[in-house]
Amino acid sequence: MSVGASESTPVRRVLDTNIVLDLWVFDEPKATDLRTSVETGNTHWLATAAMREELARVLAYPQIVKRLTHRQLPASAVLGHFDQYAQLHADAPKAPYACKDADDQKFIDLAVQHSAALHSKDAQVLCMKKRLERCGVALNPVTTIPA
């Protein structure tokens, strides 16, 4: 699934915490198209208050603080991106399939509720690809921005 020009319908996506870190903490080159899609409105980033709380908690982990300090980037700037771009929704009802990692369930539940694409690198989520597809969720679809 590609993201087209700005006149196309935005794609609903749920981004797990590691993906958010790739976008704005690690500046991961492979995440450039997804970050651009979020920033230009070609992606509707769906999230919940619990996802923001998890991000705030993770931003305080020593290895993340070290990276933020190295980049002279305050955690509040990363949370600012969340606040600017994420569209907050209520917690979703439990999806038909449970993830072995309970911390990842909220991302799955929200993606299933909204038939949104789910972006995750977590092994416990990746192994659920076929089950998620049965629920209308594309796992890590390609995100390209036309030149």
Image (spheres, rainbow, N blue to C red):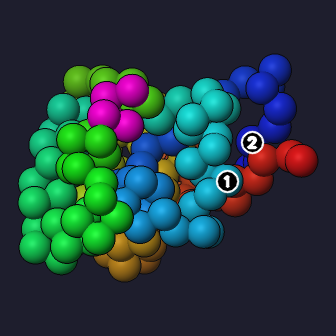
Residue 12 seen in this snapshot = no
Residue 66 seen in this snapshot = yes
Q: Is residue 48 left or right of residue 123?
A: left
Rendered location of residue 134, percent (x, y) = 54, 53
Q: How many marks?
A: 2
Q: Secondary structure at mark 2?
A: loop
Q: Is residue 134 left or right of residue 143?
A: left
Q: Which of 4/65 is in front?
A: 65
Q: Residue at x 64, y 31 (%)?
A: 40
Q: Secondary structure at mark 1?
A: helix
Q: Residue at x 48, y 63 (%)?
A: 27
* First to last magenta residue range: 80-84
| In the image, residue 82 lies in the stretch drawn in magenta | yes
Q: Which of 73/119 is in front?
A: 73
Contact (Cβ within 8 Å) of mark 1 with mark 2:
yes
Rendered location of residue 76, percent (x, y) = 21, 41
- The residue that disc 1 covers is 33
Q: Residue at x 47, y 35 (%)?
A: 45
Under mark 2, the amino acid is Val
- The residue that disc 2 covers is 3
Q: Is residue 29 left or right of residue 27?
A: right
| In the image, residue 36 lies in the stretch drawn in magenta | no
Rendered location of residue 29, percent (x, y) = 60, 68
Rendered location of residue 82, percent (x, y) = 34, 36
- Above or below — where is 40 with respect to 66? above
Q: Which mark is residue 112?
A: none
- Above or below — where is 10 with respect to 74? above
